[in-house]
């Protein structure tokens, strides 16, 4: 990226964005991505600009062995990079998703939901996103899966999960009910009609 867009792009901070010129065209570039790597996302305003950039990346990237790839679910979950619609959605509030540091309720700025968030903060939450480790080597996530205790009480729901070579087991991001926030708590989960044991843990995994 620095070879194409100059060394200035190295100054772009994580989740910040700016415009950069290349061969007379201006590209909108963000320091973001679908994994915990320090990558970039490039937004183009027409198909020709996109096709040209694609070619430039491979031409200039030969010395770096640049190849096409795809989003890495393992790194996303290990690094706790949350995905809207998977890990949280409009059923959840920001406190449950661990976004406390982004919520400024004492400022003079008024915004949608501010009073409701004040009430939630005062009352406290009864569930939150946490990590889970499951003693198995595969899982198919077509929808969220229920986690339950030996007494059949609901521990929570795993929302994203995958096998992690780092831990040699399935890891996931789950909405866990308050009684089970202790990281020593174990649970059961059904995968392909068999029951497996898992443990609640903190995020991120790495």
Image: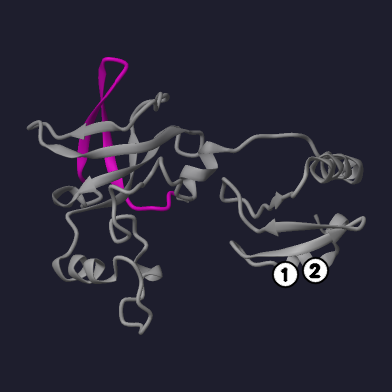
Q: Which residue is at a point 77% across and 45% down the rendered structure image? A: 46
- Asked if the stretch drawn in magenta spans residue 135, the answer is no
Count of number-bearing discs = 2
Quadrant in the picture for residue 191: top left
Q: Secondary structure at mark 2?
A: helix
* Viewer-proximal residue among 123 and 152: 123
List x then y, in percent, for residue 29.
71, 57
| Residue position marked by numbered label 2 in the rendering | 8
Residue 6 location in percent, x, y?
Answer: 86, 63
Q: Where residue 140 appears, x then y in whole percent?
A: 41, 24
Name the element at disc 1.
Answer: helix
**What colour scheme does the image use?**
one colour
Location of residue 117 by image quarter: bottom left
The residue shown at (35%, 83%) is 107
User: Which numbered circle lies on residue 44?
Assistant: none
Image quarter of residue 109: bottom left
Left or right: residue 124 compared with residue 169: left
- Relative placement, left or right, of 185 versus 169 is left
The region drawn magenta spans: 185-205
Which residue, given by chain and number where applicable, does mark 1 sit on?
11
């Amino acid at each position: 990226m620095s070879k194409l867009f100059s060394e200035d792009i190295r100054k772009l901070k994580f989740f910040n964005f700016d415009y950069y010129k290349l061969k007379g065209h201006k590209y909108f570039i963000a320091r973001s991505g679908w994994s915990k790597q320090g990558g970039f996302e490039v937004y183009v305003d027409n198909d020709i600009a996109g096709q040209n950039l694609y070619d430039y990346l491979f031409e200039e990237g030969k010395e770096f062995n640049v190849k096409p790839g795809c989003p890495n679910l393992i790194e996303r979950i290990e690094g706790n990079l949350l995905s809207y619609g998977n890990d949280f959605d409009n059923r959840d509030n920001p406190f449950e998703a661990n976004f406390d540091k982004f919520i400024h309720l004492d400022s003079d700025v008024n915004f949608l939901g501010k009073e409701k968030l004040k009430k939630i903060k005062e009352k406290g939450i009864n569930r939150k996103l946490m990590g889970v480790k499951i003693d198995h080597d595969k899982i198919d996530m077509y929808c969220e899966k229920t986690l339950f205790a030996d007494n059949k009480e609901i521990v929570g729901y795993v929302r994203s999960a995958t096998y992690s070579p780092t831990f040699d087991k399935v890891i996931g991001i789950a909405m866990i009910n308050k009684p089970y926030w202790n990281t020593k708590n174990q649970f059961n989960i059904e995968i392909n009609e068999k029951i497996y044991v898992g443990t609640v843990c903190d995020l991120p995994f790495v």
